[in-house]
Image (tube, rainbow, N blue to C red):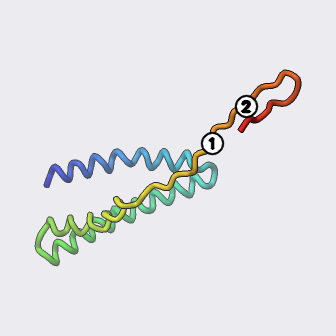
C-alpha cells in the first residue's frame, strides 16, 4: 500500500511542473492570470474534497482502503482520455529565384 502511495506522490509532484509550464506558455497577458487562478482554484478544491470524501467513505465502511479507493476511482476515466492533436502540415518546397519572388513547388 505504501508503494502505491509513493508512486502516486511521485506522479503528482512530477506532473505539477508540466501543468504550470503548459498553462504559462499556452496563454499570455490576462489569459495567463486566469489560467493560473483556475489551476490554483481546482487545486484548493481538490485539497479539500479529496480528504473529505476519503474520510467520509472510511467512516461509513470502517475500512481505510475503501476510503482511498473511493478517492482514486473517479479519476480512472481520465486514464482513458485521448490527447487531441492538431493536423500536421505537409512540407512545402520553396525554390529560390534570383530574378523575382521565390516559387512554391507542391
**SS state under label 2:** strand
Mark 1, secondary structure of its residue: loop
- Residue at x 82%, y 25% (from the top left corner): 97
The outermost residue toward the front is 106
Left or right: 69, with 34 as reference point: left
The tag on residue 94 is 2
Q: Position of residue 35 (x, y in %)?
A: 53, 56
| Residue 89 percent location from the top left of the image | 62, 44
The crowd level at tag 1 (other Cα within 10 Å; few <14, some 14-19, many 20+) is: few
Q: Which residue is mark 1?
A: 90
**Residue 52 percent coordinates (x, y):** 27, 70
Q: Nearer the viewer, residue 3 or 106?
A: 106
Q: Is residue 41 above or below residue 12?
A: below
The residue shown at (26%, 52%) is 8
Q: Residue at x 33, y 47 (%)?
A: 13
Percent across and percent down for residue 27 are: 59, 50
Inter-mark Cα distance, 1 to 2:
13 Å
Amino acid at each position: 500500500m505504501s508503494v502505491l502511495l509513493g508512486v502516486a506522490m511521485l506522479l503528482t509532484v512530477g506532473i505539477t511542473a508540466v501543468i504550470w509550464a503548459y498553462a504559462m506558455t499556452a496563454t499570455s497577458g490576462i489569459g495567463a492570470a486566469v489560467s493560473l487562478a483556475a489551476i490554483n482554484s481546482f487545486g484548493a478544491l481538490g485539497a479539500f474534497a479529496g480528504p473529505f470524501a476519503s474520510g467520509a467513505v472510511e467512516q461509513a465502511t470502517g475500512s481505510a482502503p475503501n476510503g482511498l479507493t473511493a478517492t482514486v476511482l473517479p479519476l480512472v476515466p481520465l486514464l482513458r482520455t485521448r490527447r487531441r492533436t492538431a493536423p500536421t502540415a505537409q512540407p512545402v518546397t520553396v525554390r529560390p529565384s534570383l530574378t523575382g519572388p521565390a516559387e512554391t513547388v507542391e
